[in-house]
Image: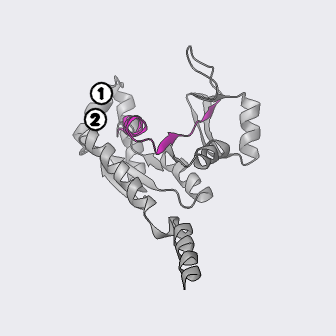
Amino acid sequence: MVISSPSGGGKTVVRSGLLKQDKRFSFSITCTTRARRPGEVEGKDYYFVSADQFSRLRAGGKLLEWAKVHGNYYGTPVKSVVEVLEKGRIPLMTIDVKGARSVKRIFPETVTVFLLPPDLKTLVQRLRGRGEAPENVAVRLETARAELKVASGYDYLVINDKLPEAIREVAAIAELETRKTGRNLDKVTAFRKQLDRKI
């Protein structure tokens, strides 16, 4: 599952809430070229790699998506997502719209959720509440304009007005998706085999 939103839309807090409340979800660990901060653990918080290593991962098609942020590279290794899937859990990613398209190309069954605040006033308040400078708020709002142009390509839309409700809605989407017939053909096949033996 991929959650995207404009900056200030609340994707990080929704992700944190889902990971705490719903054991079906697991965060897929990203890799970064930035220096490790005090308390961060290799393989838990990030995979810390050099710029050369990151470049090789990217060139080798081993990253689902990547971006350069504040001079450092960040990316989601394919292996990180596969490891979560092999544990029978739902990989949860909070990435931008470009990254979401990349993930959907490699994993077509990815469920995408676009998260929106209830209105523009709330979004601006959230950005200012984080201590964003006025010029940064303007840049983020312009980015939001571009992101909204592709929101219609997402599978679901959740309005993040009240956080607990937004978390419940995303969890409900996951529940709905796990019930789809196409994701449960093994159960249909197993039942048919039982029926064939009985008849």
CA neighbours of label 2 inside 10 A, class few (<14), some (14 to 19), many (20+):
many
Is 134 in the magenta? Answer: no
What residue appears at the point 50 percent right and 43 percent down from the top-left corner? Answer: 93
Disc 1: which residue? 128
Q: The C terminus appears in which quarter of the rendering?
A: bottom right
Q: Identify the residue at the far front of this view.
A: 198
Please give left or right for residue 113 compared with residue 59 in the image.
left
Mark 1–mark 2 contact, CB under 8 Å?
Answer: yes
What residue appears at the point 23 percent right and 45 percent down from the top-left corner? Answer: 119
Can the viewer see residue 95 in this picture?
Answer: no
Image x and y of residue 124, in percent: 28, 35
> What segment is highlighted magenta in the picture?
10-32
For the residue pair 144 and 33, the one nearer the viewer reads as 33
Can the viewer see residue 107 in this picture?
Answer: yes
Task: Name the quadrant containing residue 150.
Answer: bottom left
Disc marking residue 104: none
Disc marking residue 124: 2
